[in-house]
Amino acid sequence: MNIGSASSKSGLPAKTIRYYEDIGLLKPERAENGYRDYSTSDVHKLRFLQRSRGLGFSVEECRQLLALYEDKERASADVKSIAQSKLVEIDRKIIELRELQQTLKHLVAHCHGDRRPDCPILETISGEK
Amino acid sequence: MNIGSASSKSGLPAKTIRYYEDIGLLKPERAENGYRDYSTSDVHKLRFLQRSRGLGFSVEECRQLLALYEDKERASADVKSIAQSKLVEIDRKIIELRELQQTLKHLVAHCHGDRRPDCPILETISGEK
DNA sequence: CTTGACCTTCCAGTTACTGGAAAGATTACG
DNA sequence: CGTAATCTTTCCAGTAACTGGAAGGTCAAG
């Protein structure tokens, strides 16, 4: 499929998809006419990139994560250690998101339009309990 | 406190803290000697910035989130709508992180060193069920 | 057969840092 | 007290990850 379809299916702008090709993240086939031709598997990977980038992983980290699926000859110990360190990171991110969520809910519920002199919620945000 | 302490307490590099000041995110006091002087509240905000940036919110979004606490005169309807749209976003991010987590766990558990011709996990990652 | 929506490459601009130079301030050591 | 190490300051340049726009080729619809 063309880049436009790949874009709407993955949620990534066509510009970004071309950029990912430039930096060697994902190289699609080319049709006779020179157009990029994306497979379903390519779209899966693009969607994966769209998600993990949006969740705060760097492009280099995404490259590692993608490699977990693509580098079939890689030693399994390698795969495992990368995946596991990412799992720790993901756990942390989930916890932080829950805290942020709590803070915002608290704000919506309790700080409704009053003018706090020094909102105690800030301490919650900052993770100082 | 000096920028070095603020840096180690917030987890943000001093460079980044100065950059945030440049773009008007957080303006600390200045000591007699010209050194930046951060309050405990400033450090809370920096830590908050460190977290929300790491969770994939843009600097402009972080500016909005910070404003929820600082802009005490703001109409509460405004506050509520911003906070609520962020809550929706956070929910989505948590779900996506859980999916990513599942995928990686699956990989560690089931793809231990074999050479898959076409790993079915990719379909899971991509969110296509 | 042309109009409009695609696609291509290339180059410049933006966002959010990040590194390094040059110089002043502070602390720690002998 | 001198001086060396370790802050800190500003400024300017570089990098990462896009993003916009020009100039032009391709294609499906009327």
Image (cartoon, coloured by chain):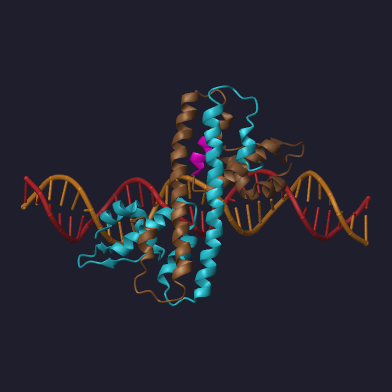
Chain colours: A cyan, B brown, C orange, D red
Q: In the picture shown, does residue A16 fall above or below A39?
A: above
The chief SS type of the magenta part is: helix
Q: In the picture shown, does residue A79 fall above or below B75?
A: below
Counting from the top left corner in percent of width and height, residue C15 is at: 48, 45
Residue A69 position by quadrant: bottom left
Counting from the top left corner in percent of width and height, residue B71 is at: 56, 28
Q: Which residues are magenta?
A: B58-65
Residue at the location (49% across, 44% down)? B58
Counting from the top left corner in percent of width and height, residue A101 is at: 52, 40
Residue at the location (26% across, 55% down)? A5
| Left or right: A65 as drawn, with respect to A121 | left
Residue at the location (49% across, 77% down)? A75
Please identify the quadrant where the C terminus of chain A is shown: top right
Residue B102 position by quadrant: bottom left
In front: B26, or B8? B8
In front: A98, or B55? A98
Please identify the quadrant where the N terminus of chain A is shown: bottom left
